Amino acid sequence: MDWLTEPWSFEFMQRALLAGIVVSVAGGMVGVFVVLRGLAFLGDAVAHTQLAGAAVALVLGGGAVLITLGAGIAAVLTALGVALLTIRGRLREDTAIGIMFAGFFALGVLLISRQRTFAVDLGSLLVGHILGASWTDLIVMAILTGVVLVAVLAFLPELRFTAYDPEVAAVSGVPVTLMQVGLLVLISLATVVAFRLVGVILAVAMLVTPAAAAVLISRRLTTMMLFAALIGIVSTVLGLYASFHLDFAAGPSIVLTAVLLLGIIFVLSPRGLREALPNLRLSADVGQGEDIPAWQRTTRACWGLCCLIGGVCWGACCRLGSRLVTPR
């Protein structure tokens, strides 16, 4: 029994747990939209571009609040920059994201490298320090999470309509462009919450992984959000146990726990492995009666396996592989 209760006797573990709950709620509300609309790359880019804003705050000698403010400004500027560059199809969305990603991240590393505490500061910003979360951090993160929560609930019908069918939504009178820009800003705020606690590298994982698991469980948007938040909280609790008892880094432990839960749900969910197996068998059977080389049949089967394992996490693999597994 002491094994279960001992970690929570320490105040820093209590703060870490509260921080994880805050991250999970923010990620659950927004992460589902990221998964459904295929915006994981945007979340990754926003998480990394926050480094520039945090770096400016460090150069100015700012504390936790100023660092969070700087990261938030950089994140929102990234989202607005992507929206501006992609208006009316002037640039592809992935191109605009890549430009903002590279520019802001390079600026952040450049600014931090000018400081004497480069290694320490950069390491803390990249992988976070959830066990060192202060009450000030928690208050700031809770405020940001509250803003995200209120905005999502207030515009949930419009966001849902835009996410599933933007063309029909536009015809129905929904301000699609405004909703899309607003969603980008909400993604930015959610990544700011995760950034301060689990760092640049792990922020996108806490945004996407629980949401991807929730998509395998339910088809209702609000239920997906609830499950995403719950999976994030469970990952936080189990990850903190692993960190405390096994002396692992807390942030990576939480993220790896979320990935393991995703794997378990993928195997057990009717929408996961059991739904993918027939497609795998079909891709392995393709070409059996055709006069094609054995290596090509093997390649088709391998692409089918790739989609089986990674279809939840990367759609590009399946889209590219479909050219090999589809009979001509």
Image (cartoon, rainbow, N blue to C red):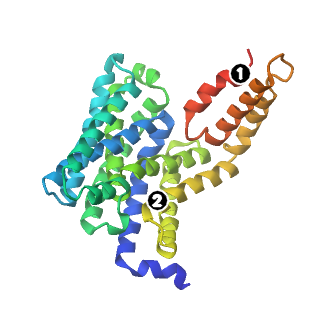
Q: Is residue 327 visible?
A: yes
Of mark 1 and mark 2, the one earlier in the sequence is: 2
Q: Where's residue 2, x and y in %?
A: 52, 85
The residue sitting at the right extreme is 289
| Residue 131 vs residue 261, the one in the foreground | 131
Q: Is residue 154 visible?
A: no
Q: CA distance from mark 1 to mark 2?
A: 38 Å
Q: Residues within 10 Å of mark 1 (few under 14, many from 20)?
A: few
Which residue is labeled 1 in the image?
326
Amino acid type, residue under disc 2 in the picture: Pro
Q: Where's residue 137, x and y in %?
A: 27, 62
Screen quadrant of the C terminus:
top right
| Residue 198 vs residue 169, the one in the foreground | 198
Screen quadrant of the N terminus:
bottom right
- Residue positioned 47% across, 63% down in the render: 236
83 displayed left or right of 256: left
Q: Which mark is residue 99?
A: none
Which residue is labeled 2 in the image?
252
